[in-house]
Amino acid sequence: MNSLAKLYRLKEAPSKPSKYLGADIIEHYYPDAPTKRVWGMSSYQFVKEAIRVVELELDKVGKRLETKVNTPMHSDYRPELDVTPLLNAQQANYYQELIGILRWAVELGRIDIHTQVAMLSSYLVQPRVGHLDAVFHIFAYLKAHDRSKLVFDPSTPIIDERRFTTYSWQDFYRDAKEAIPPNMPEPRGRAAEIHCFVDADHAGDTVTRRSHTGILLFVNRAPIIWYSKKQNTVETSTFGSEFIAMKTAVELMEALCYKLRMFGIPIKGAANVYCDNDSVVNNTTKPESTLKKKHNVIAYHRVREAVAAGTVRIAWEDGNTNLADLLTKNVTRDKLTFCCRCIFA
């Protein structure tokens, strides 16, 4: 901005950014490294105002938000099994407005409510009283846990290379190679690393038995993409649902790599992917592995070809430390706390 100010007359003097699409943009300081400054993003003000508006509406009907809420949704609540009365047209419209607010809070970094908002978004057409109560429960959780800041740390995490195995794929995908943009600018600056956690909740929907995909994607130490969505098909096994989730993760990573390269940002090595399903890891990292279920063949070859091309490499991750678990189901309070400590500052 200072360089532009030398060429053009600006309406305001250049200054550090403080707001972006409702998010608070701040500088983050590390206690153990006072000279290290990185950018951070917080939804605190947006969430605070949303809670204020919701509480005003509840006050009109003599209600209040719950207190001492530790998770975004009660562990035993299943939206698909809710048989409470349907909301009237006015109430349904209000429900849709609240879901829209929560969706934007997710976009601004509230990854911890993503799964619950995704679940309740399935009932925008015919929401029930119980669904609206579940939405109010999410707002109560946000009120009790209102300070969640994403830090875009450019430093790279320490990776144990022994977790990854290397094989020759020449006999299986000899023409496999990453799609490099032919018109990309010359890469400059320090190379970026991509890391991804992927998981699936097999048959998580107790009515349709569709699984739920969760993906958390980092550039260096900065969380960039968070994805939580019900799968489009019914998978008969955990292996199938995990493979579908892995295919989605590979597509997201390839799209991100393409975008970074078009920005002129160099990428260091293959993207590191962490999955907690042994069968999926073996089938995607060992060339001699064979697929016994034909209906998973598209995802099978899609992921293996990306590994052969050197776009991604996959390692097993313990389910207790897989951060993508947060984006697939209602996790326990302890697991929620662990994931939030790893994601938020």
Image: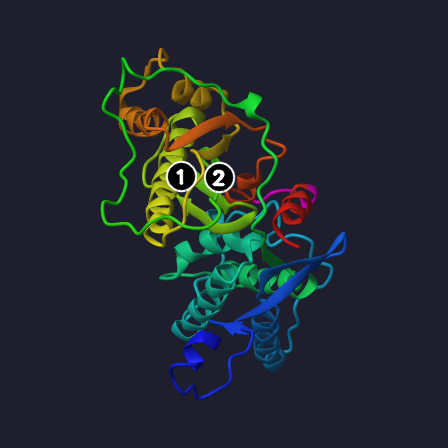
Q: Amino acid at mark 1?
A: Ala
Query: Considering only vertical position in the picture, is 200 above or below 160?
Result: below
Residue tagged 1: 249
Q: Main secondary structure of the magenta part?
A: loop
Instruction: Reply yes or no: does residue 122 show up in magenta.
Output: no
Look at the numbered discs 1 and 2 and tell me whether their residues touch, using CB distance below 8 Å: yes
**Residue 212 drawn at (x, y percent):** 44, 41
Left or right for 126, reference 47:
left
Query: Considering only vertical position in the picture, is 85 above or below 179?
Result: below
Q: Examine the image and state in which quarter residue 292 appears.
A: top left
**Residue 189 drawn at (x, y percent):** 46, 50
Mark 1 closeness class: few <14, some 14–19, many ≥20 residues within 10 Å: many
Decide if residue 187 is in sight here: yes
Magenta residues span 330-334
Q: Residue at x 27, y 28 (%)?
A: 298
Q: Amino acid at mark 2?
A: Cys
The residue lying toward the viewer, choosing from 94 and 26, is 26
In the orientation shown, which residue stands out farthest toward the front? Answer: 6
The residue lying toward the viewer, choosing from 284 and 214, is 284
Query: Considering only vertical position in the picture, is 183 above or below 102?
Result: above
Q: Quadrant of the C terminus?
A: bottom right
Element assignment for label 1:
helix
Residue tagged 2: 196
